[in-house]
Amino acid sequence: MYFFELGNTPTLSVAEILQVLNQAKIEYKLVNLSTDILILDLKQSILPDKLIQQLGGCVKIGQIISKAIEFKSADLAKIIQQHIKNQSNKIYFGLSNYSATKLDLKKIGLEIKNQLKNQNLNSRFVASTQPILSSVIVKKNKLVSLRGIELCFLNNNYLGQTLAIQDFVEYGYRDFQRPERDMISGVMPPKLAKMMINLANLETDQTLLDPFCGCGTILQEAVVLGYKKVMGCDVDFQAIDKAQENLKWLIQKFNFNFDLDENIFQCDVRELNSKIKDNLIDAIVTEPYLGPTRQRYDLEKLIIELEELYLVAFKEFKQVLKPGGKIVMVWPIFTLGKQEFKLNILDQVTELDFKQLDLLPQEFKQKKDMKITSRGSIIYSRRGKGVLREILMFKK
């Protein structure tokens, strides 16, 4: 059994994990699910380091190493000894509590340290003011290494060992060190871009299109994931220049085998089919124009304009997508006080012969910690923000 620490939007994280497992044809059975942790019984072993590189919404991956343990320090010390591969130098260990049971981690950690000392083992207990060690602390203190270990107390008295953590340094580098960022219209986080791509569940030799590519975040993460046929366009010439610069930078910095060719080009989405052949695209993953970010606007008028734009876009998508092709798309939700204002075009989209797809299997949607809206979408954002991102998926 494996556990996954979920990101800031747990429902989207779970949806992504399940799609990636489906893509790899790995069967799973749900064991436990909470706000922070997903535990799955997998029918085959996985490579945690490789899997976490593919996932955008997973913070840690670990394996269940004990069940129904009472968290006695002597037992925990023995488990640490069993799982540390190199005991010739100082042992590093840390504790994280994801369970509903309150635990005095500092007391438990010091007791474990004394138990190890009695076995003539030199150790360092990595403590934190928070019950959960961040991925930064885990990495900096060598807790995922030959002589390090993080033990995680999980719900239903499961004990897990962290095997892989999200590479926060690389995400930050790809986000903030790339040559071009558009701070006026806003920049999609690379993690969200990767999650949306994974939801599309494509083979790496299939063709992915972002018709509102902006400075190229979705294109960038598609290249990182190994996709060879990536296309992007935008109505804004400056956005195209930025996207091309960012892709050139990415390819050079990380030595990716990807040919830009003429795959990023200027095009109004209303004329998409004039630039792209019928039935060429396997999936569209995109965040369209969501409205102005810094100036005042007439909300009612803006929603009408966006609805018209998106419906025209779907008509073009229908032409360029292959039969069975998917769309993973962001729609804006505008908040005003406690009120939310959404785009009401689902019926029109389905009338264009698109089917809205479930983002989660029924078994998962029924769990109280999974936040699926009444119309089957997932919200990526924290409440209180001016514009929320609503993730929806469709199939031609």
Image (cartoon, rainbow, N blue to C red):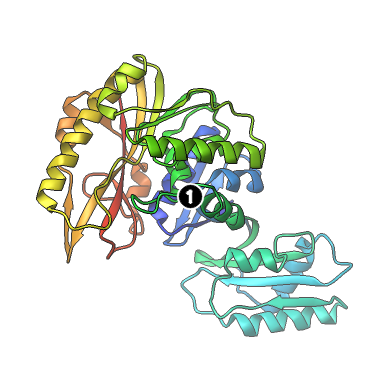
Residue receiving disc 1 = 191
**Left or right of 275 on screen, residue 386:** left
Residue 20 or residue 271, whichever sits in front = 271
Within 10 Å of disc 1 (Cα), the crowding (few <14, some 14-19, many 20+) is: many
Return the x and y of residue 71 as percentages of the image width and height: 62, 74
* Above or below 45: residue 33: below
**Left or right of 288 on screen, residue 337:** left
* Above or below 116: residue 372: above
Residue 69 or residue 248, whichever sits in front = 248
Q: Can you say which quadrant of the picture contains the C terminus?
A: top left
- Residue at x-position 15% and y-position 31%: 348
Q: Is residue 27 visible?
A: no
Residue 46 or residue 251, whichever sits in front = 251
Which residue of the protein is positioned furthest toward the top in this rendering?
Answer: 278
- Residue at x-position 37% and y-position 48%: 364
* Above or below 55: residue 317: above
Return the x and y of residue 28 as percentages of the image width and height: 51, 42
Return the x and y of residue 270 as percentages of the image width and height: 24, 26
- Residue at x-position 36% and y-position 29%: 326
- Residue at x-position 15% and y-position 34%: 347
Residue type beneath disc 1: Lys
Return the x and y of residue 255 as percentages of the image width and height: 67, 36
